[in-house]
Amino acid sequence: MGKVRTKLVKRLAEELVYTYPDKFTTDYEHNKRMVDLLVAGLSKRMRNKVAGYITHLIARGLIRPEEES
């Protein structure tokens, strides 16, 4: 069984990557800091889920942020 991510996590992650394409990389720790800076009011757990999903998308090549700008 794989991990289940809610639509909120997926939507927020995709919006962040498309809005700030140059801010995210395949490094989870870097993405975690960027999500914390860009989105106010997220809990630590939600921040980590969003950062993990962004890392997953970029590492798998499902989203290429440098092409979207």
Image (cartoon, rainbow, N blue to C red):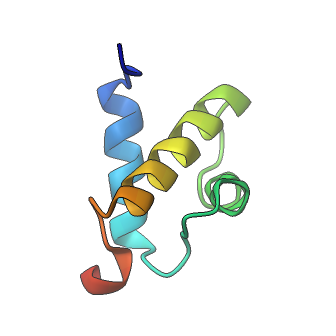
Against 28, residue 44 (above or below) is above
In the image, 34 versus 41, the foreground residue is: 34
Q: In x, y percent, where is residue 44?
A: 72, 32
Return the residue found at the far front.
Answer: 1
Against 60, residue 3 (above or below) is above
Which quadrant would residue 46 be assigned to in this image?
Answer: top right
In the image, 34 versus 4, the foreground residue is: 4
Return the residue found at the far top.
Answer: 1
Residue at 73 percent of width and 55 percent of height: 29
Q: In x, y percent, where is residue 26?
A: 55, 64
Q: How many numbered marks have been drawn onto this rendered protein structure?
A: 0
Against 63, residue 47 (above or below) is above
Q: Please state if 2 lies on the left or on the right of 34 as rendered.
A: left
Image quadrant occupied by the C terminus: bottom left
Residue at 35 percent of width and 24 percent of height: 6
Which quadrant would residue 11 be assigned to in this image?
Answer: top left
Image quadrant occupied by the N terminus: top left
Q: Please state if 19 lies on the left or on the right of 67 as rendered.
A: right
In the image, 19 versus 59, the foreground residue is: 59
Q: In x, y percent, where is residue 9?
A: 41, 35
Against 37, residue 32 (above or below) is above
Q: Please state if 41 lies on the left or on the right of 65 as rendered.
A: right
Which quadrant would residue 42 be assigned to in this image?
Answer: top right
Q: Please state if 26 lies on the left or on the right of 21 as rendered.
A: right
Residue at 40 percent of width and 64 percent of height: 17
Residue at 36 percent of width and 31 percent of height: 8
